[in-house]
Structures are given as structure tokens and as C-alpha cells.
Amino acid sequence: MGRRWVLRMGGIALAVLIIVTDAYAGNRQDLHYREHLGDKIRNRHFQVKPIAEGVAVMSLIDDSKHYLAHCDNTGNTYLWAVDKKSKRLRAERDGNKITISGTSSGEPVHKQLNKDGLPWFQSLYYSLSCFVRSDRQSIEFWMIRPDNLSLVKLRAEKKAVETIRVNGKKEKAKKIRLGLTGLLSYVWHGYYWYRAQDGVLLQYKDMKSLPGRGKLTVRLCEAGEE
């Protein structure tokens, strides 16, 4: 496996940290996270609000990069939009067909992706919070890779409930393993911890660094509800 393939896997690891929400789709909520990637630190601010078709989740990274996802109440994504300096994209799902349009680095983009009956989870934190509250032990789904706008299949699996410390406070959390499918599941995977009482994401951790990339961790700083 070459360096290019490893960097693509690193892009997937970062992509899963784009968007987040909580279990209460009926409430508007603001969530603040701090991301550590090697020596780099970034702040992420998530605004979550209910809409007629489910929830809308806006993600702001250092107040300069904007991402939007619309999902139904099962976590299945039907709209995803990116607005940052070099990329403005909009992806919309109709059945199992996803159409992507916009611009990237000044070039027009028009692409159609066809998937099978598995759901599309682009807002992973929200979609996995739905999975956490379900009776299922594992789930497979599709996600669009932001680097090349292709589909990649991922698998989430429930692990044991653990007690972790976040912001100096002990929290009981449901642990989820996320990784690639098949033999590639051993190449990269990470863990999410969701607060047991309400499904709010508390933290994410890479289990080990990919070659050429620092270890990625994300932790909840504060949350507010309206």
C-alpha cells in the first residue's frame, strides 16, 4: 500500500469528524469541541436545529469552513453542502442516487453516485447517535469522501459501556467502533463515546496514528440547549 492510499485513509478519518449533533432532534443545540491533530488545535462549533424532514446540522471550523447536513430521524442523509474558500458543493439524494454539483478549486463539478440500499451517513455524529439508540448491534453505511467525492463503505459496531472523564467530570458513555469494512477494517479505525443518558458525543479518538499523520482526538468543551 503506497503513501497516496494511506493519505486517502487519513482523509476518511478526518471526514468523520465534520458534523455532530445530539439525541434530541426536537431541541436547538450548540456544541463546542476542540480537535487535536498532532500539534495542531482547531475549534469546532456545531449548531443543530429541527426541521420538518428531521434535523439540520451546521458545522463551523474556526469560523471559516462551513458544512451543512440535512438528515431524517433515522440518520439517513438527504442533503450535504460544503462552503469554504476553495470548494462550494451541494449533494442531494433521490432514492439511491446522489447528485453532486458546484465548484472545486475554480472548476465546475457535476457528479452522480449510485449506491445500494444501505443508508448514506454524511453527518456521522448524528447518524451514529441514532444507531446508538437503536436495538442494532452493528450497521454498515455509505459516506462520501470529501477528497475525491467517491463513496466509501463504513461499519459501526457497539462496544461496552464505559466510564470516561471529560472536562474533569466522570461520564458513563456508550462506546462505538468505526472502521472500514472487510480486511481494510484492520488498517484504520477509531472510537466514539456517546453520553449514555442523552446521546451527546463526548469524544472521538484514533486508536493509532496513520503513517504521515498525527493522532486525532476530539473532545466536547461545552453544550447549550434552547
Image (cartoon, helix red, strand yellow):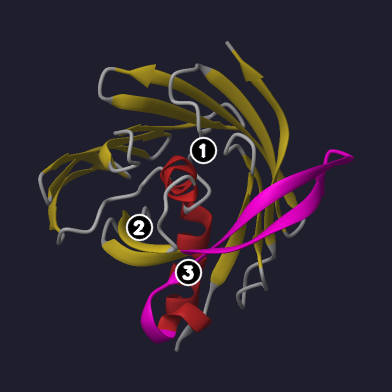
Q: Measure the alpha-carbon separation of dots 1 and 3.
A: 18 Å
Kind of residue at disc 2: Arg
Q: What is the quadrant of residue 130 in the picture? A: top left
Q: What is the quadrant of residue 140 in the picture? A: bottom left
Residue 91 at what x, y percent from top left?
Answer: 22, 40
Q: What is the quadrant of residue 189 in the picture? A: bottom right
Which of these two is toward me, 98 or 87?
Answer: 98
Label 1: how many Cα within 10 Å (few below 14, some 14–19, many 20+): many
Magenta residues: mostly which secondary structure? Answer: strand
Query: What residue does disc 3 label?
Result: 179
Q: What's the residue at 16%, 59% (across, down)?
A: 115
Residue 42 at what x, y percent from top left?
Answer: 68, 41
Query: What residue does disc 2 label?
Result: 145
Image vertical order of residue 199 relative to residue 190, above or below: above
Does the magenta-highlighted stretch encompass residue 65?
no
Range of residues picked out in magenta: 157-183
Front tag of 1 and 2? 1
- Is 13 situated left or right of 103 in this image? right
Q: How many marks?
A: 3
- Which circle marks residue 20 in the picture? 1
Does the magenta-highlighted stretch encompass residue 181?
yes
